[in-house]
């Protein structure tokens, strides 16, 4: 069964304290791994797409990496405005538009 | 402004009273999808559409219907809502099978 697991469920960091969020997946055929940010009361907002093991993408303080079994979202020197829930999703099976989301990591960055 | 809109944003209804949640996008996207988001379960895909008149089931389609008669619109229909359909609903669209753009969400309560 296709599955996506994110850890930790919640994370509290001091401003400037770097850390990583994990997204592990077991799917029959990966057609893309996506990271989204979700602020309270809003819809998810796209961050990155990764397609193959070894791929990396960066945006400001965020860097996403991908292996054959998991993806990491590295947050370098976070600021309070980085506080949000970070969602990981995988697209499986090129013939469909099916997505499986993880349950997210709630990040709180303290000033 | 490129966006996905949903209406209504909030809805309280009673068991068995048919309702429709509308979704519209102005980006000429072929792909559209409906999700529900529940605490501890994350985002789960209800239905998706890969083009006009082409729809298919996601992971949790029971109790829901959709239609795609125009490219821009993808309404979600609950013929006979039940309390277990109380949830936060998101519509999303994408160009090709790339990143999804999400609407602002519809919070539904079924009494």
Image (cartoon, rainbow, N blue to C red):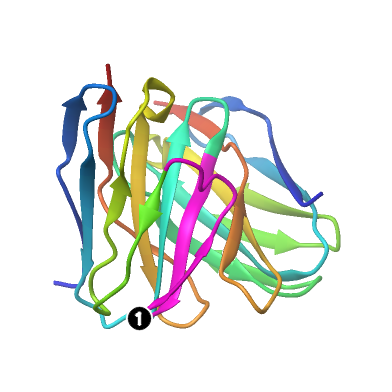
Query: At x 28% / y 23%, what residue is drawn?
Result: B15
Q: Is residue A96 left or right of residue A37?
A: right
Q: Disc 1: which chain?
A: B
Q: Considering only vertical position in the picture, is B45 above or below A41?
A: below
Q: Position of residue B40 (x, y in %)?
A: 57, 26
Asked whether, in this view, residue B53 is left or right of residue B104, the answer is right
Residue placed farthest to the top in the image?
B111
| Image quadrant in which the N terminus of chain B is located | bottom left
Provide the residue designation for mark 1: B52
Q: Is residue A72 left or right of residue B105?
A: right
The quarter of the picture where residue B5 lies is bottom left
B65 drawn magenta: no
Q: Is residue B73 left or right of residue A108?
A: left
Q: Quadrant of residue A55?
A: bottom right
Residue A29 picture quarter: bottom right
Is the stretch drawn in magenta largely helix, strand or loop?
strand
Query: Looking at the figure, which quarter contains the C terminus of chain B?
Result: top left
- Write the residue at 35% across / 42% down: B89
Local packing at callout 1 (Cα closer than 10 Å; few below 14, some 14-19, many 20+) is: some
| Closer to the camera in the image, A45 or B76 | B76
- Eyeballing the image, is A45 above or below B82? below
Residue A5 picture location, percent across and down: 72, 40
Residue B8 seen from this side: yes
- Residue A59 seen in this snapshot: no
Residue at 42 percent across and 35 percent down: it is: A83
Provide the residue span drawn in magenta: B43-63
Q: Position of residue A107 (x, y in %)?
A: 51, 32
Q: Front-most of B59 and A74?
A: B59
Q: Tell me how many marks there are.
A: 1
Circle 1 SS class:
loop
The residue depicted at 29 percent of the width and 42 percent of the height is A42
Residue B63 x/y as whole percent:
44, 41
């Amino acid at each position: 069964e296709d599955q996506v697991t994110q850890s930790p469920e919640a994370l509290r960091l001091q401003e400037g304290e770097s850390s990583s969020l994990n997204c592990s997946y077991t799917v029959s055929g990966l057609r893309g791994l996506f990271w989204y940010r979700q602020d309270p009361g809003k819809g998810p907002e796209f961050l990155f797409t990764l397609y193959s093991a070894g791929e990396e993408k960066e945006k400001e303080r965020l860097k996403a990496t991908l292996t054959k079994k998991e993806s990491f979202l590295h947050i370098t020197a976070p600021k309070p405005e980085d506080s949000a829930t970070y969602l990981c999703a995988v697209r499986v099976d090129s013939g469909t538009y099916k997505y499986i989301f993880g349950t997210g990591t709630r990040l709180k960055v303290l000033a | 402004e490129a966006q996905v809109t949903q209406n209504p944003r909030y809805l309280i209804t009673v068991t068995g009273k048919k309702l429709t949640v509308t979704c519209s996008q102005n980006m000429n996207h072929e792909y559209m999808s409906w999700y529900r988001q529940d605490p501890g379960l994350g985002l789960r895909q209800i239905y998706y559409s890969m083009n006009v008149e082409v729809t298919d089931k996601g992971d949790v389609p029971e109790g829901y219907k959709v239609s795609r008669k125009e490219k821009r619109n993808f309404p979600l229909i609950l013929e006979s809502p039940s309390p277990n359909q109380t949830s936060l609903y998101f519509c999303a669209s994408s160009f090709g099978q790339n990143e999804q753009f999400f609407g602002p969400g519809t919070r539904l309560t079924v009494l």
